[in-house]
C-alpha cells in the first residue's frame, strides 16, 4: 500500500470509529480478527449499521457490569449472540471474560 493510500485508509478508519464510544472501540480492537480497522473496512453499509445497533444493546450490558450486575450483563450479552449472529463473537468473548473474572470460585474456596 502506498503512503497516500495508507493515509486515506487511516482517515477512513477514524471516521468510521467515531460512531462508537471508547469502551467499545477497546473491545472491538481486542476481539476483531485482524484488528478493528480490518473489521470496519470489511463490513458493508448494512453491516456497519447493524454494528451500531449492536453497540447500543451491548452498552446496556456494559453498564450493568459497571454497577456490579454481572449476571444481568451476561444475560444481555447472551441475547445479543442470538440477535446479532455476525457479531456474536464479541459478546461471547465478553461473556467468557466475565465468567472467568467475576463468577469463578475464589482460590480460598477451591482449597477447602
Image (cartoon, helix red, strand yellow):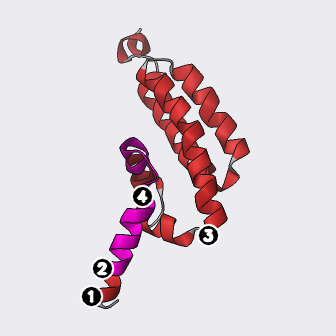
Q: What stretch is highlighted in magenta?
A: 8-25
Q: Distance between the residues labelled 2 and 1?
A: 6 Å
* Relative height, residue 4 to residue 92 (above, below): below
- Tell me if residue 36 can be seen: yes
**How many residues crowd around disc 2 within 10 Å: few (fewer than 14), some, or many (20 or more)?**
few
| Horizontal arrangement in the rendering, residue 60 relative to residue 68 (left or right) | right
Q: Mark 1 points at which residue?
A: 3
Q: Is residue 9 magenta?
A: yes
Q: Do the residues labelled 2 and 1 touch (CB within 8 Å)?
A: yes
Query: From this viewpoint, which residue is outermost toward the bottom?
Result: 2
Q: Name the residue under label 3.
A: 44
Q: Pinpoint residue 41: horizontal percent, then vertical percent.
A: 50, 71
**How many residues crowd around disc 3 within 10 Å: few (fewer than 14), some, or many (20 or more)?**
few
Q: Pinpoint residue 92: horizontal percent, then vertical percent.
A: 57, 43
In the image, what residue occupies the spot 72% across and 44% down?
A: 83
Q: Mark 2 points at which residue?
A: 7
Under tag 1, what secondary structure? helix
Amino acid at each position: 500500500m502506498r503512503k497516500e493510500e495508507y493515509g486515506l485508509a487511516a482517515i477512513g478508519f477514524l471516521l468510521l470509529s467515531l460512531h462508537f464510544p471508547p469502551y467499545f472501540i477497546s473491545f472491538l480492537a481486542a476481539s476483531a480478527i485482524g484488528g478493528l480497522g480490518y473489521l470496519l473496512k470489511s463490513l458493508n453499509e448494512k453491516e456497519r449499521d447493524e454494528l451500531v445497533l449492536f453497540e447500543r444493546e451491548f452498552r446496556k450490558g456494559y453498564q450493568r457490569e459497571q454497577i456490579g450486575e454481572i449476571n444481568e450483563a451476561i444475560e444481555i450479552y447472551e441475547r445479543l449472540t442470538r440477535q446479532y449472529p455476525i457479531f456474536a463473537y464479541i459478546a461471547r468473548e465478553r461473556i467468557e471474560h466475565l465468567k472467568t473474572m467475576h463468577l469463578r470460585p475464589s482460590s480460598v474456596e477451591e482449597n477447602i
